[in-house]
Amino acid sequence: MMRIFFRCFCATMLMGVLSLAQAVGLPEINAAAYAVADEQSGMILASQDKDARIEPAALTKLMTAYLVFDALQSGKLKARQPLKISAAGWHTDGSRMFLQQGVPVNVETVVQGMLVVSANDAAITLAEAVSGGEKAFVRRMNAEAQKMGLENTHFVNCTGLPAEGQYSSVGDLLQLAQALVRDFPQYQSWFAKKSFFYNGVTQLNRNLLLFRDDQVDGLAVGYTINGGYNLAVSSKRNERRVIVVLVGADSSEARAAEGSKLLGWALTAFNTTRLYPANYKVADIAVYKGATGKVAVGFLRDVYITLPSDGAKQLSTELEAVQPVVAPVRKGQGMGTLKLLFGKQVVAQQEVVALDSVGEAGWFGRWLAGVSLWWHGLFS
C-alpha cells in the first residue's frame, strides 16, 4: 500500500493545537484537570491532564441522561408516562428529589429532577424504567461508552456515588457532553432550569453559573471527598457554543469561577469559521478498474475550524489517501484523511469521503487497470 499526498494552501488564521493556549494567553486555572472545546468544530482549545483517570462523581449522570434521552427519542419512554418508584430508588443515598415508594411520577418530572438537582433517586428510577434494573442499565452505559470511544471510562453505577472501579477522564466527559448537545438539542433547556419543585420542596440548581451568566445552559456539577468539585458546563454566545469540563476545584465557588474563566477565554479569544462547505471537492483520487478513472473526495457535511481571533497565519492542508482505490466505490466511503497543519504540526484532522459513487469498468477496462497496477507495483 502506498500513500499519496496532495498539498494546498489557504490564507487563514491558526496556531498549533499544543500552543493554542499559550498563543492567546490562557488564564491560570486552579483545578486538577480540565478541557475546553468548541462544539461546532470539535477542536479542544486547551486542556490539562485530560486523559488522567478521575472520579466522575455526579458527572456520571451525563451518560445516564444520554441513554434516557435516547429512550425518549426512540419512544421507549414517553414524557408523560408514569413511573413507579421502587424500594431501591426510594432508599438510594445522596442527592434526592424525594420520590416516594409506590407513588407514580411522570418521566419528564423525574428526568428534570435528575438534571436540575442531580437526584440519585431519579437516576435509579430512570435506569429501572429503561433497562429493568440498575445493573442492566450500567451494562448499557459501558456499551455506549465503548461505542463513543471513551477509552478512559468505566461505570459501576448510574448515579456517580463513589464506587470501586468507576472512573473517567475530563477528555471522555467532554466528548460525552458534546454528544449530548449534538444528539439531543431538544432537551438542552432541561439542563438550564434554575430550580426544581417536587413533593413540597423547592431545590436550586447547584450550577452557580446558571445564575451568573444568561448564556450558560447546562450541563452538570458534582462533588466527592476524594475528587473535589467537578463541572461540565456549556455556553452559547452569538450562535457559537463552547463546552468546559473541569474537575478537582476546591469549592463550589471555585468551580464556578474557574469554569467561568475558561468559558470567557474560549468565547473571546477564538472564532470558529467554516473551512469547507458540504460536498466541496478537496481533490480527485485515482480509481482503478472503475467506470471513471477518478473520484472527487471531500466532506458530506460542512467542516469548521476554530482559530485565534487575533491570529494571522498561513494554514496548510495535506490530504493523505491510501492507494490503490479499486472500484466499486460508494458515495460516503472513507478515502483518506485531510490534515490541517501549522508549520509541521498537525492541529486537526478529518476523514475525507467519496462525493460520488464509481461503478466497475467492463472486462477490458478491469484487465487494463490490472496491468497498470502490476506495472506500478514493480516501481513502488
Image (cartoon, rainbow, N blue to C red):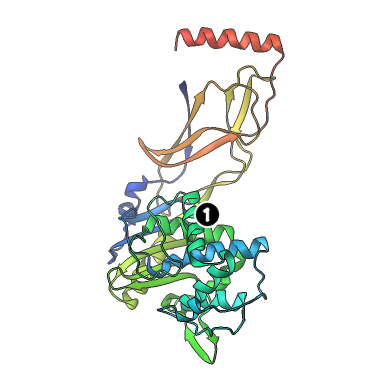
Q: Residue at the right extreme?
A: 362
Task: Please give the name of the residue rendered at 39% of the width and 63% of the height, measured from the top-left corner.
Answer: 245
Q: Position of residue 210 (x, y in %)?
A: 47, 76
**Number of numbered discs:** 1
Q: Quarter-wise, where is residue 105 in the image? A: bottom right
Please say if 227 is above or below 44.
below
Q: Residue at the front extreme?
A: 87
In the picture, measured across the screen, residue 78 lies left or right of residue 220, that is: right
Please say if 360 is above or below 190.
above
Q: Position of residue 52 (x, y in %)?
A: 31, 55
In depth, the one of 37 and 289 nearer the eye is: 289
Please say if 344 is above or below 191.
above
Q: Quarter-wise, where is residue 128 in the image? A: bottom right
Q: Position of residue 146 (x, y in %)?
A: 47, 50
In the picture of the structure, the residue carrying the numbered disc 1 is 40
Is residue 235 at least partly visible in the picture?
A: no
In depth, the one of 201 and 235 nearer the eye is: 201
Q: Position of residue 197 (x, y in %)?
A: 54, 86
Q: Secondary structure at mark 1?
A: loop
Is residue 366 at least partly visible in the picture?
A: yes
In depth, the one of 238 and 372 nearer the eye is: 372
Q: Which amino acid, mark 1?
A: Gln
In the picture, measured across the screen, residue 225 lies left or right of residue 90, that is: left
Please say if 219 is above or below 359.
below
Task: Please give the name of the residue rendered at 65% of the width and 64% of the height, measured from the top-left corner.
Answer: 76
